[in-house]
Amino acid sequence: MSQLAIDIGNSRTKVAIFDAHRLIKVDRLERLDTDSLLRYFDGHDIRQSIVSSVNDDIGFLEDILAKRTNYTRFSSQLKNSIDNRYETPDTLGLDRLAGMVAAKALYPGNSCLVIDAGSCITYDAIDHTGIYKGGNISPGLNMRFKAMHTFTGRLPLIKLTDFEGFEGCDTATSMLSGVVNGALAELKGFIETYRLHYPGLKIILCGGDANFFDTRLKSSIFAHTLKTEPDLVLIGLNEVIHQQ
């Protein structure tokens, strides 16, 4: 008996199959259509499913899942393991909430900082009892490049590439240095601040740019408390299934 977890984001969809709490398959898709969804039922005895979506137009997917499984649509109102004290819980990003549910399941009894490095970079911490009070949101790497190009007259639109120096030697590398080193300094600064407030803090990286930051943070003083978990949101969604 398996569970199907689906995370529909702004730019891509992630689909995972779990056997109880064990992740057995993950796909990253540009789009999830009816045929693609039905193929997940071939060879898997899927009894439960959950969807987290930034898009409300998913009725056709929900119809299939409701007919074939015990289906749950993830929301902030669902019972979960987090004591959510966010003042506007209905506005809290579902990926942020799912990430914290996963962090609590992976590191029970520990305070955790979840850094989701995607379109935006989000920072969310829970204490050792699972209390969540609030977090931080800043532009992601590609958003910073687009902003510099869009809101200036002459700066080009460049793509993220490896950059190891501390200063650029031309316009493109100066932009790279500013974005990469600026974001890295931001991460380190937030981590240091959170460590002062949350003793024994575990740091968990996820999101599309997680591996980019992982290699750079692993050489820092945070290496022994840092874990990269690209499927954190999916793990959290699966945990919510078991908490209903």
Image: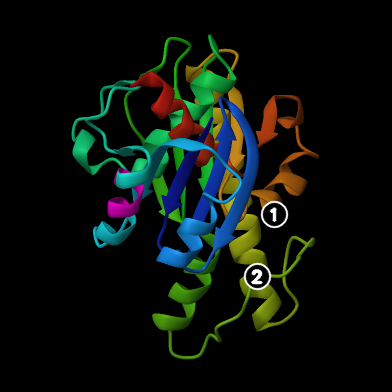
Left or right for 28, reference 59: right
Is 148 included in the stretch rendered in magenta? Answer: no
Q: Is residue 43 above or below residue 212?
A: above
Amino acid on which the number 2 mark rests in the picture: Leu
Give 20 or 239, whichever is nearer the viewer. 20
Judge the density around disc 2: few (<14), some (14-19), many (≥20) Cα neighbours within 10 Å.
few
Residue segment shown in magenta = 62-66
Q: In the rendered image, which quarter is residue 87 located in?
A: top left
Mark 1–mark 2 Cα distance, whole angstroms, equals 10 Å
- Are circles 1 and 2 on residues that touch, CB within 8 Å? yes
Q: Residue at x 47, y 57 (%)?
A: 38
Residue 160: give its label.
Answer: 2
Q: Is residue 84 visible?
A: yes
Q: Residue at x 68, y 31 (%)?
A: 226
Q: Is residue 91 above or below residue 127?
A: below
Give 197 or 239, whichever is nearer the viewer. 239
Where residue 60 appears, as percent x and y from the top left, is 29, 61
Where residue 22 appears, as percent x and y from the top left, is 63, 29
Where residue 108 appears, as percent x and y from the top left, is 54, 13
